[in-house]
Amino acid sequence: MAKETAGYRHIDCAKVYDNEKEVGEALKTLFSTGVVKRSEMFITSKLWTSDCAPEDVSKALARTLEDLQLDYIDLYLVWTKPGSRGWDPEIMAPLCLPDTWNAMEGLFASGQARAIGVSNFSTKKLQDMLGYAKIPPAVNQVECHPMWQQHALHNFCMSTGVHLTAYSPLGSPGSWIKGEVLKEPLLIEIAEKLNKSPAQVSLRWGIQSGHSVLPKSVNEYRIKENLSLFDWCIPHELFLKLSQIHQQRLLRGDTAVHETCSPYKSLEDLWDGEI
């Protein structure tokens, strides 16, 4: 609960994180003790690929709401997660996204999901969805940080009114993801000039780019540091310099590519060329 007492108000959840029951207990305590009100929190969860059959969508959200001890979710995302470890190609059977999205729209209409969106959608996949969606996705949650800036996708989202949210905005240091975003020399150089940490510069870059960021930390000092972003900015000339960083997608999705069990035969197929 350190994040909530520090001032954080958005919690990003998912069934496959295997902690929604624990999050639900923490939320119950926060609400019952008056630390925050439900209306002050923004809770996101995600529909996992194995639950994307239209008849399973409402059941999946019902389980999530039960575990989180909530009556509604603020944002529910259709989530394909090609970065996962232990990926089972059997769940990569071709999806009928129009049918899945129609079921998601039903959750929105019922009030169980206050907003609906997607995650890991390329520009092409998002463009396709906008062609058949009665209710357009509110959010596209994707990998985005100074080492993977996603300019084309970012511009498309802005032009269509889809808000881009960045997961792994620090490159997920300390995790299984092999990334060195915070060790990028140019990022360190700019951080030193601004008397900020590389993490703060990375997060501030995201905010100044026009998207929201989802940092993760279990360190109380860093939790507070990551929130200290709103009383300063990166000067324009330094902000532009960050575009010089060599671009590299960290969550490539190799395990989602399979010759027979997956609709994606290559990384080019998976990301529609955005790799």
Image: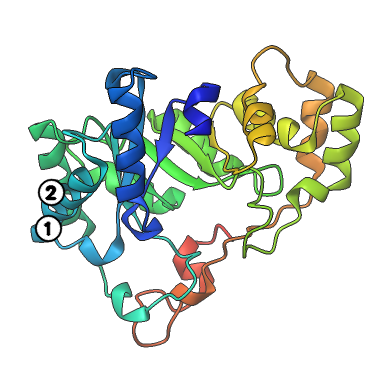
Q: Position of residue 60 (x, y in %)?
A: 18, 54
Three-letter amino acid code at disc 1?
A: Pro
Q: Could you say which is closer to the camera, residue 107 or residue 44?
A: 44
Residue 270 in the image: above or below residue 35: below
Say the numbered circle drawn on residue 54.
Answer: 1
Q: Which residue is mark 2?
A: 103
Residue 113 in the image: above or below residue 39: below
Tell which residue pokes out farthest to the bottom in this image: 260
Is disc 1 surrounded by few (<14), some (14 to 19) or many (20+) residues within 10 Å?
Answer: some
Residue 164 appears in view? yes
Q: Position of residue 177 (x, y in %)?
A: 63, 62
Q: Position of residue 267 (x, y in %)?
A: 52, 71
Tell which residue pokes out farthest to the front in this image: 33
Q: Secondary structure at mark 2?
A: helix
Residue at image coords 80%, 33%: 197
Tell me whether circle 2 and circle 1 mark residues in contact (CB < 8 Å): yes
